[in-house]
């Protein structure tokens, strides 16, 4: 389903909340167990995780601080079934993978607003979705499995919901002001971090400003070959710098309603000396090679939103109302300066911009019919997004001649036309409690309208003369049904069915790329159908004061997966024609478990001791090609033993991963004389981490962690691109950091 296509090989050769949630105590230390935490993403209403007919993870501020979380990989470190994809040589972290699905098939949102989509093409262009400073968050909620019935397109694999801090999180116990400072160090990338938070409150007005700055170097690994060429396994030298600001102003005209104005800005800059791009092959006058490469990459996101909450609407059609309007802009700029062995220089600039405007509204109504209690949730979402992408550049020959033609491109070029998408969704869900509250049924449905409109400007037209582009209009219906049966005081059974879909993306519908020199062209496909899924999940939960267990199994059946740039033969001009098509039929199934023990409930002498564990196993099959899916992670489990006293605590956490066993066959080799390639299989591993926290004074906390205690060499499956490692001597390039230390100090008054 994600195997390299002939076009991708040619390119690499030629281009070497969902709803609102009431303020909670996430910023204040909270010892709530995982299964008892409150979430809103899976149901769009406040429900404990144990009361949801799906698998949901809630990671609160306290947990993020104690585990010294600074990026997405840290966030899901102890969450089997979740992983983060990455690029080892330049671009860093990409996005979160849920149960084998990744990229734009997973919805990532901040305060209910969808994050920008990702896009990459060739070797010098990779716009990711890593736009959020985790220090601005009070909680992260992750829904595993199809969630289109509540969140529409792009929630095919699940939802990652970031919830930012609110003034009320700091203004408790009658306080009308708050000031906090936080300083940190992350040994994985020699990162220095600092942040400041100020909040104020009064009878009707309250506000918050949170400012953060981070700077550091490349993420370390276990590679020890530090040559300045493509045999390098040590990380490429980098300088990283980032900053963020979150500001909120809240006006509460009464106790039952609030207006919230939010401004958010996040930006990151990375400078890389791409030593691993320097070729060790022998150049010729006709085929010069790379002799040096420097990269300057920037990305930023700006969001402005206005929300209004009414808790006591007391109308026949709704008890409460929430609406939000917003605008969000994101920009990615990636600049590459390359030196060639013939004395020439190449300068490339990739840009990818998205500008979105949106409106959301949600209403809730509680009512009773006979012996059945209903909690009806319904609403509307509308988003209009403009997407622009461009590659530009020039070449300077050894004699000083400047040309905008860098084979095979005549810059500037667009790989798809400027595109405007309009997404409209209507949804409704009814949580019904029957049999005296022992049984909950949760039916729901969502209807989505998706429209895509291309705008052919002079850049796209000149690069793709005569190429026909397509508009797209699709309507999708996504039903779901969930059930929770509390058949005993401490036991419950849950089950669910959910239909998911993903609209055909702009870059697959209207790709425009013609390369006469290399003999190929890519054309639009106006007949693409949405990708769809049917997901089933069945689980059992046991919850007691001393222990809890949640065990579930799932089966997801995917249809019409879009395979980008399929070779469809040759056209009248003799060019190989590539076109995105619906061809993939896949299934992913597996089992997950979370369990914990509170030893203090068993014996007063063991007060403060607790055990946490989780495990995830999955299997995926590409049924079209009758081979395993390469995006499914191997068996993974975590185990943590912790002790918490009044003022301090310590935790020893282990991660254990099985060797990746089921792999698709290697890609077809284009050179029959080359040695046969085999698919790289990273070994299984076990890693131990030790973390501690100390509240050494009122409002003062020190957190410290030593990660990978045994300094073990290991490679995560999500860190490599399947089929990319054909030379085993380069595998250390993709290895994880060895033993590192991280620490943070937070003070407030």
Image (tube, rainbow, N blue to C red):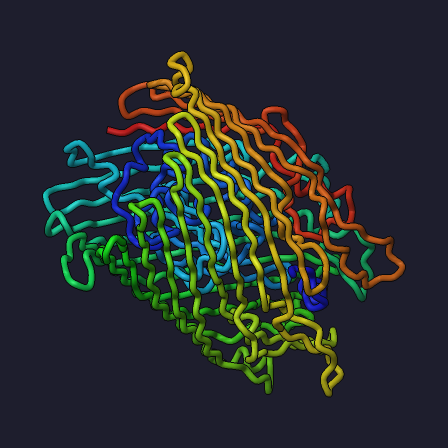
- Give me the residue at 68% from left, 36% from top: 684
Instruction: Give the vertical position of 509 relative to 112 (above or below).
Output: below
The picture places residue 736, in percent across and down from the top left corner, at 62, 37
Instruction: Give the vertical position of 466 relative to 92 (above or below).
Output: below
- Horizontally, residue 156 falls left or right of residue 51, namely right
- Give me the residue at 31% from left, 50% from top: 434
Q: Quadrant of residue 39?
A: top left
Q: Is residue 654 visible?
A: yes
Count the marks.
0
Q: Residue furthest top?
A: 605
The picture places residue 643, in percent across and down from the top left corner, at 43, 20
- Horizontally, residue 364 falls left or right of residue 738, namely left
Q: Which of the two residues, 57 or 728, is positioned nearer the viewer here?
A: 57
The picture places residue 695, in percent across and down from the top left corner, at 34, 21
Quarter of the picture holding the N terminus: bottom right
- Give me the residue at 28% from left, 52% from top: 20
Q: Is residue 399 visible?
A: no
- Horizontally, residue 626 falls left or right of residue 463, namely right
Quarter of the picture holding the C terminus: top left
- Give me the residue at 33% from left, 18% from top: 646
Instruction: Give the vertical position of 724 relative to 617 (above or below).
Output: below
The picture places residue 637, in percent across and down from the top left corner, at 58, 35
Q: Residue furthest right?
A: 673
Q: Which of the two residues, 65 or 301, is positioned nearer the viewer here?
A: 65
Q: Quadrant of residue 181?
A: top left
């Amino acid at each position: 389903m994600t195997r390299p296509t002939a076009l991708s090989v040619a390119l690499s050769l030629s281009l070497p909340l969902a709803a609102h949630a009431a303020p909670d105590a996430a910023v204040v230390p909270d010892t709530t167990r995982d299964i008892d935490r409150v979430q809103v993403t899976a149901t769009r209403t406040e429900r404990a995780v144990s009361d949801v007919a799906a698998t949901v993870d809630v990671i609160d501020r306290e947990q993020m601080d104690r585990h010294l979380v600074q990026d997405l990989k840290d966030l899901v470190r102890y969450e089997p079934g979740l992983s983060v994809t990455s690029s080892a040589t330049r671009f860093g972290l990409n996005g979160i993978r849920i149960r084998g699905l990744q990229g734009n098939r997973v919805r990532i949102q901040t305060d209910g607003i969808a994050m920008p989509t990702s896009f990459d093409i060739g070797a010098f262009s990779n716009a990711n979705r890593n736009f959020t400073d985790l220090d601005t968050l009070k909680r992260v909620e992750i829904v595993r499995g199809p969630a289109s019935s509540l969140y529409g397109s792009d929630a095919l694999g699940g939802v990652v919901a970031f919830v930012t801090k609110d003034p009320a999180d700091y203004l408790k116990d009658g306080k009308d002001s708050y000031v906090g400072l936080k300083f940190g160090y992350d040994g994985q990338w020699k990162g220095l971090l600092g942040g400041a938070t100020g909040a104020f409150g009064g009878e009707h007005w309250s506000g918050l400003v949170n400012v953060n700055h981070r700077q550091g170097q490349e993420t370390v690994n276990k590679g020890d070959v530090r040559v300045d060429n493509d045999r390098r396994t040590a990380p490429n030298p980098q300088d990283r710098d980032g900053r963020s600001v979150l500001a909120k102003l809240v006006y509460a005209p009464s106790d039952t309603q609030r207006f919230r104005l939010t401004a958010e800005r996040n930006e990151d800059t990375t400078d890389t000396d791409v030593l691993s791009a320097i070729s060790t092959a022998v150049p010729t006058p006709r085929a010069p090679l790379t002799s040096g490469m420097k990269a300057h990459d920037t990305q930023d996101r700006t969001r402005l939103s206005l929300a209004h909450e009414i808790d006591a609407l007391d109308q026949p059609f709704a008890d409460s109302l929430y609406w939000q309007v917003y605008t969000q802009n994101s920009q990615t700029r990636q600049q590459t300066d390359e030196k060639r062995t013939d004395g020439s220089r190449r300068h490339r600039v990739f840009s990818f911009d998205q500008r979105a405007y949106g409106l959301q509204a949600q209403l809730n109504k509680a009512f009773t019919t006979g012996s059945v209690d209903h909690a009806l949730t319904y609403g509307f979402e509308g988003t209009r997004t403009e997407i622009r992408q461009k590659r530009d550049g020039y070449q300077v020959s050894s004699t000083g001649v400047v040309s905008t033609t860098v084979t095979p491109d005549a810059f500037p070029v667009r790989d798809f036309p400027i595109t405007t998408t309009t997404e409209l969704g209507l949804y409704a869900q009814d949580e019904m409690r029957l049999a005296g509250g022992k049984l909950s049924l949760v039916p729901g449905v969502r209807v989505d309208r998706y429209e895509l409109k291309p705008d052919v400007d002079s850049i796209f037209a000149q690069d793709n003369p005569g190429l026909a582009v397509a508009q797209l209009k699709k309507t999708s219906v996504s039903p779901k049904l969930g059930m929770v049966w509390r058949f005993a005081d401490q036991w419950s059974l849950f089950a669910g069915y959910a239909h998911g879909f993903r609209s055909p993306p702009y870059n697959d519908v209207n790709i425009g790329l013609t390369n006469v020199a290399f003999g190929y062209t890519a054309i639009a496909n106006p007949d693409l159908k949405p990708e769809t899924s049917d997901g089933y999940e069945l689980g059992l939960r046991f919850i007691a004061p001393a222990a809890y267990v949640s065990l579930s199994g799932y089966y997801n059946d995917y249809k019409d997966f879009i395979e980008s740039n399929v070779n469809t033969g040759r056209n009248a001009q003799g060019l190989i024609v590539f076109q995105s098509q619906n061809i993939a039929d896949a299934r992913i199934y597996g089992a997950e478990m979370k369990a914990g023990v509170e030893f203090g409930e068993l014996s007063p002498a063991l007060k403060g001791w607790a055990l946490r564990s989780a495990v995830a196993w999955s299997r995926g099959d590409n049924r079209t090609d009758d081979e395993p899916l390469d995006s499914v992670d191997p068996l993974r489990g975590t185990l943590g033993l912790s002790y918490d006293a009044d003022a301090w605590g310590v935790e020893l956490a282990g991660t254990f991963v099985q060797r990746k066993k089921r792999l698709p066959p290697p890609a077809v080799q284009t050179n029959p004389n080359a040695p046969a390639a085999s698919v790289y299989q990273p070994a299984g591993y076990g890693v131990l981490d030790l973390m501690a926290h100390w509240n050494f004074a009122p409002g003062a906390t020190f957190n410290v962690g030593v990660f990978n205690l045994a300094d073990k060499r290991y490679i995560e499956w999500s860190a490599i691109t399947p089929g990319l490692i054909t030379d085993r001597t380069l595998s250390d390039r993709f290895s994880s950091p060895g033993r590192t230390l991280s620490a943070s100090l937070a003070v407030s008054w």
